[in-house]
Image: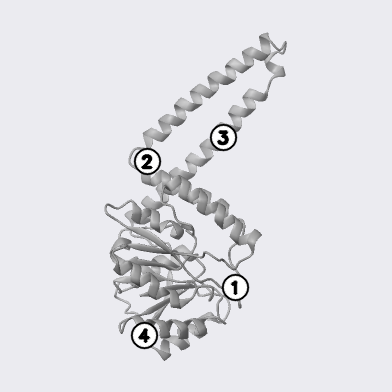
Amino acid sequence: SIISPVYNEEKNLEILFEKLHVELDKITTSWEIIFVNDGSLDNSSKVLHKLSHKNSAVKIIEFTRNYGQTAALMAGFEYASGEIIITIDSDLQNDPKDIKLLVKKLNEGYDVVSGWRKNRKDNVLIRTFPSKLANILISKVAGVKLHDYGCTLKGYRSDVLKNIKLYGEMHRFIPLYVNNYPASKVTEIPISHYRRLHGKSKYGISRIFKVILDLTVVEFLSKYSQKPIYIFGAFGISSFFLSIIAFLLTLYFKFFGGKSFIQTPLPLLVVLFFLVGFQSILMGLISEMLTRTYYESQGKKIYVIKNLLNIKKDKK
């Protein structure tokens, strides 16, 4: 099963389909391509309808509006029927010829094979540099060392995706979720990468801030979701010691600096800003957990489907 999120890619879709068709026929006789139209505002929907009528192996999921790449991939995972699932962008920057390399690695026993855009053809300042920073940060914090978490071209065994629930923009962290399972195997391989010919990139330098926040959530949920007292208790103890340090500094300035408590606001400001920032992050984590509980306890999805083509409505 090939899953490709689509957002305003009308000029790329037919070319991508033809390339995928050629490569998939070389690998297997049983394949499907699931395009997830994530609320495109151009003529992507018309092109996708045309492709679905042309070939019944082309399956279309259309959202009511733009929900983001994570939601698009989740919908694709839900409706995919293949034992091997490949995700690929629809912007033609990935080469469908690399799919056979992913499949080969998966057949060697790996559960996730991530593409590595070793010679990336993107704007260095806006995309490549922030991406490298994000990848270094994720690898350091999470302990799963991959060069290119953000690359959409990845291969999965379908069984490792069954219990994964993604929110926000957490699709890049799927290897981390899988790596937490016993006996799971995650690897990466170098792949080709090309400049975008048509359309406009949807990512920018702001992505690194989203990565930091998402990474914080992933780490919190993986380590403290069932024992939050550890992190909240640690926060309480840390705050207590900070208050002691601030008090000692205040005494120092009072007796050795010749300044009154009113003349030394710096310790108070340091503690204040630290507490406000930390409490804000903790509130965000709690909200994230409440959001997940809300969706999962009621069986709600993070997207609304408007239309399905070449997919049975009662499949899920």
Q: For the C terminus, which image quadrant?
A: bottom left
- Element type at marker 1? loop
Crowd class of label 3 (few under 14; some 14 to 19; many from 20; radius 10 Å): few
Which tag is nearer the camera, tag 4 or tag 2?
Answer: 4
Which tag is nearer the camera, tag 1 or tag 2?
Answer: 1
- Element type at marker 2? helix
Left or right: 310 in relation to 123: left
Cβ–Cβ under 8 Å for marks 4 and 3:
no
Above or below for 57 versus 270: below
- Image spot of residue 101 (x, y percent): 39, 72
Give, as a three-letter code, the residue at label 2: Tyr
> Which mark, residue 276?
3
Of pointers 1 and 3, the one earlier in the residue sequence:
1
Left or right: 63 in relation to 276: left
> Which mark, residue 195?
1
Left or right: 269 in relation to 107: right
Q: At 33% across and 77% down in the image, what residue appears? A: 313
Q: CA distance from mark 4 to mark 2?
A: 46 Å
Which tag is nearer the camera, tag 2 or tag 3?
Answer: 2
Of pointers 2 and 3, the one earlier in the residue sequence:
2
Q: CA distance from mark 1 to mark 2?
A: 41 Å
> Which mark, residue 224?
2
> Which mark, residue 265?
none
